[in-house]
Image (cartoon, rainbow, N blue to C red):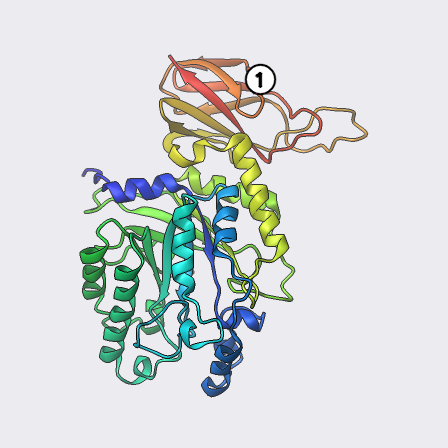
Amino acid sequence: MSLPIAEKRIVDFEELGFGIFVHFGLYSQLGMGEWIQHIRKIPKEEYIKLADTFTAENFDAQKLAKLAKAAGAKYITLTTRHHEGFSLYDTKGLSDYDVMHSPCGRDLVREFVDACRENGIKPFLYHTTADWYNDDFHEDFKSYLKYLRDSVEILCTNYGEIGGFWFDGNWWKKNNDWEEDALYGMIRKHQPNAIIVNNTGTSARGAVGNPEIDSVTFEQGRPTPMDREGMPKYLAAEMCHTMNEHWGFGENDFNYKSAAHLIETLCSCRKVGANYLLNIGPKGDGSIPLLQEAMLLTVGEWINKTGACIYKGKPCGVLGDGKNFALEAEGKLYFFVSDLTISGNENVTVAGGGAGEKCFTGVSAKIKNVRWVDNGEKLDFEQDADTLKINCTAYPYGTSLVVRIAEAEIE
């Protein structure tokens, strides 16, 4: 048995490391999540009236791209069409249920890809495969699949080079022939370097699909290590994750994860070599909720202080106690340490976890020195065979990085 060699586009995708998911559509105006039409059984003739009030007046692609950059994200995946069937791009006459036939009258995908490129962000395009609006989806599936391919071909041929296509919905008709070869073949013809993803949903995390798929998905669940032994193709992995309980804007959803939770999740993804795709749901007018913006900026601050190795860092078989682990990047080892205490007066510091000796196994290279990335402090260490013990000092008072990273030079 042997390990497959990753194609360049997949290597490049893995080194992006962190991306932003954006769920925006007609449902955003209702503020009750992206599945509200189906969940509340809103009649089609009633739901489509939302297109008459869709202005996206505060959808600012430049701000979105700049926010992603400040967050340390390298790519953004935008919902060009979700299950409701409404398109945020000009469908060139395929349908009048698109942004060009709404009061918005702007091709939001055009604005999005242009802003991404201007700010050094890779544009990825989400596109539903299921469609609650299109009658053929329910009545003439083969005709629907042609409509789907024609829709995606517009995205392939009118917006320049796309980083990837992210599909979602095949699980809606599990026993149908989705003619995936035709869809992916068309993409390869027009966008040979694009990553192709087809979400397997929460019930089949990490499942491998069509041979043209480049990455497996882990929706709302931390990824497990990929066993690529004997695989015919090297596959990447990506976890997509909500900040609260919904993908689309939820006006009354206050159940937000903490910034610490998001940082820990990013690290847990990179621990196994998976990308982290963190979602935001703009409001009905296209503006980004302030808390979601603040969360992204907070993750970006953490990356700026300690996390640059999350991009090129690769799993290297080095593991520590509990959540601790190491990545290898550009000839150095980076040790990720969780649950450190803060040094200071006992009346103002909170106990929990601890500083001191942390043990890592699987370290085959001879270590020259170890230092904290955030402040450059050198750390004492002992190495015996493949075991490394690092004396991890506590955070200086006024600091708590959730996950702290130590850089080790190799002799």
The one nearer the camera, 193 or 230, is 193
Q: Quadrant of the N terminus?
A: top left
Q: Is residue 269 above or below residue 184?
A: above
Residue occupied by mark 1: 377
Which quadrant of the figure has residue 98? bottom left
Lateral position of residue 125 relative to residue 303, left or right? left
The one nearer the camera, 263 or 350, is 263
The one nearer the camera, 226 or 299, is 299
Which quadrant of the figure has residue 156? bottom left
Q: Where is residue 95 in the image (x, y as percent from the top left)?
A: 34, 78
Lateral position of residue 68 relative to residue 123, left or right? right
The one nearer the camera, 133 or 91, is 91
Q: Which amino acid does label 1 sit on?
A: Glu
Q: Position of residue 208 (x, y in %)?
A: 28, 55
Q: Is residue 194 above or below residue 337?
A: below
Lateral position of residue 74 relative to residue 351, left or right? left
Q: Where is residue 249 in the image (x, y as percent from the top left)?
A: 56, 64
Q: Which residue lies furthest to the right in this view?
A: 347
Lateral position of residue 221 relative to residue 400, left or right? left
Using the rendered image of the protein, determine whether residue 322 is visible from the camera's viewpoint. no
Q: Is residue 342 above or below residue 86?
A: above
Which quadrant of the figure has residue 252? bottom right
Q: Position of residue 89 (x, y in %)?
A: 38, 67
Badge 1: residue crowd in 10 Å (few <14, some 14–19, many ≥20): few
